[in-house]
Image: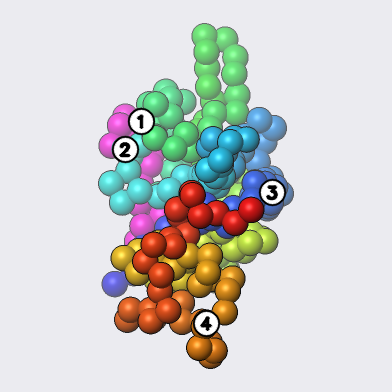
Amino acid sequence: MAARMKFICDTERCIDCNGCVTACKNENETPWGVNRRRVVTINDGVPGERSISMACMHCTDAPCLAVCPTNCIYHTEDGIVLHSKDQCIGCGYCYYACPFGAPQFPETGLFNHRGKMDKCTFCAGGPEPDTSEAEFKKYGRNRIAEGKLPLCAEMCGTKALLAGDANVIADIYRQRVETRGYGPELWGWKISYGRPKNGGTIKATGEGPRENQNQSDAQNDAGRFPT
């Protein structure tokens, strides 16, 4: 069974550096005004602020694919959502259907003509022959055909943005969440920054209960943040 390629952005690690945005634009040489990837900040400037890197999420049940009247959007064997610019008529239905704002329309003109749709391809090119000049001009670099992952994820300095087989990156994220303590066995500041009372190593990972856990000292308890 082929891998299902997906993105995951760890909001606890994203620092809003926009390195992924720059890497994507440089690698694919997208036209002016088109950003296949962008960083969105939620609760900007207030406690709880988080940033998340957004692009096409290559949905298993993609709404853009369902509404396209020319069937120019399609799935590859490994679950990547691609499109054919030769079939695109610039109607904009995919733009309105996508909850992530992934489809981009670089051109404007008379009668609100949008031009050909452009979006994140997971660095997998398009329907043209792999790594061909025609493919690069229309869709950007085909790093998947070269055995590489999307450059946005590879260039992420904090490894907040993960790309690859959905099962693999889900396991990585699950391990991070467990280590942070956002689960039934929460650990807090005394566990992460203090030392065990009886010496030894800090037991903050693993499937079993944490013996040095203080149940009333959770990391996400706003009243117990360090000063």
Q: Type of residue at label 1?
A: Ala
Image location of residue 133, percent across then percent down: 64, 53
Q: Which residue is mark 3?
A: 17
Chain part drawn in magenta = 66-80
Q: Residue at x 66, y 30 (%)?
A: 33
**Magenta stretch holds residue 173:** no
**Magenta stretch holds residue 75:** yes
The earlier-in-sequence mark between 2 and 4 is 2
Q: Residue at x 60, y 24 (%)?
A: 107
- Which image quadrant for residue 213? bottom left
Q: Residue at x 49, y 49 (%)?
A: 223
Q: Type of residue at label 4?
A: Pro
Give yes or no for contact between labels 2 and 1 (Cβ–Cβ under 8 Å): yes
Mark nearest the camera among 4 and 3 is 4
Using the rendered image of the protein, determine whether residue 94 is visible from the camera's viewpoint. yes
Alpha-carbon span between mark 4 and mark 1: 52 Å
Q: Secondary structure at mark 2?
A: helix
The earlier-in-sequence mark between 1 and 3 is 3
Q: Which residue is mark 2?
A: 63
Alpha-carbon span between mark 2 and mark 1: 6 Å
Alpha-carbon span between mark 4 and mark 3: 36 Å
Mark nearest the camera among 1 and 3 is 3
